[in-house]
Amino acid sequence: MSLHTAHHSLPSPEQLREQLATAGLRATQQRVAILAALRTLPGHPTAEQVFRQVRPANPTVSLGTVYKALDSFVAAGLLRRVADADGTRRRYDPDCTNHHHLVCQNTQEIIDYCDPQLDRLLQEFFAARGFENFQPHSYSLHITGVRSEA
Amino acid sequence: MSLHTAHHSLPSPEQLREQLATAGLRATQQRVAILAALRTLPGHPTAEQVFRQVRPANPTVSLGTVYKALDSFVAAGLLRRVADADGTRRRYDPDCTNHHHLVCQNTQEIIDYCDPQLDRLLQEFFAARGFENFQPHSYSLHITGVRSEA
DNA sequence: CTTGCTGCAAATAGTTTGCAAGCTG
DNA sequence: CAGCTTGCAAACTATTTGCAGCAAG
């Protein structure tokens, strides 16, 4: 079973600029660098992690700018805000397609998990069942357990 | 379909004291009051909300104590820490049995949702499927949508 | 009695905001 | 060149910590 360790080929600066433009955002150097970092970092990075990834090559970028850029990305739908297990910090999920999460109880590690078959199962289940006063829109399954060494 | 608006009958101080003792915690006045508040408050309260609930009747309880008590409750398995949608604050879920959540996109409201049939479905699905290097333990479905007026 | 718990206040962590100066379209 | 964006620092919010005194078992 594949756990979808997202390694899309890394986009070029031009592609990033275009993504920003399409989203209706100004393609500043900082935003391009931040978006690039998001495509590089695995999992669901925090603002701090993005900052540390971006900083070396762009010593002028400030943490505040990272926060502002991430906010604008979320508003533009390029990114999703997710809470980490503790709820102490915010994480950003660069994958906006619907997916599920495996959470390791020991390490707190969060692994993305895609499963169209599961999606179908849930769709069908709730199509048949339905709620009285709630219109479901999307489903995300949070699977808690322990990572076993393969 | 019932949405399980948890209204167990409220436990007496003695029962609360016993719950604490059973969990291996000293039954201080503060903890009894805090545990009582958790049984009263609907949904997934924040530390602040618990504090405001407890304070009037117990003017001596401090916010710091609420935090410490909640932590010890979590450690003892009386409570679950959950993150709110924003990930900015921590919430505490007094229901430690397995359940799912409906999240309203408009109001951010979180509604508990119990469904043994769904639980069974998930159990069966993952029993058949299995992961390569992950041992699933429990499943929690996060259903995003909009609350429609009934 | 003795060990853990409380209250207070100060410390920390994460995020937001205000504003002058800079860059993008 | 108009207006969004940046960088910086200060402000906030949520949570943690240190420690002397108190109380539960």
Image (spheres, coloured by chain):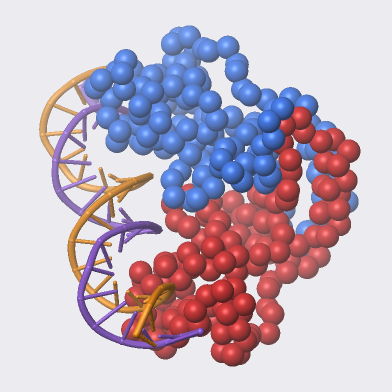
Chain colours: A red, B blue, C purple, D orange
Across and down, in percent, residue A73 comes to 53, 68
Depth order, front residue of B149/A65: B149
Depth order, front residue of A29/A26: A26
Across and down, in percent, residue B17 comes to 44, 15
Q: Is residue B39 above or below residue A3?
A: above
Depth order, front residue of A103/B18: A103
Q: Does the image show residue A129?
A: yes
Q: Quadrant of residue B9?
A: top right
Across and down, in percent, residue A15 comes to 62, 86
* Residue in the picture at 73% in, 69% down: A4
* Residue in the picture at 38% in, 23% down: B53
Q: Is residue B45 above or below residue A145?
A: above
Left-right relation of B35 to A106: left
Q: Quadrant of residue B148?
A: top right
* Residue in the picture at 45% in, 43% down: B90
The N terminus of chain B lies in quadrant: top right
The C terminus of chain B lies in quadrant: top right
Q: Is residue D4 above or below residue B107?
A: below
Left-right relation of A79 to A115: left
Q: Does the image show residue B72?
A: no
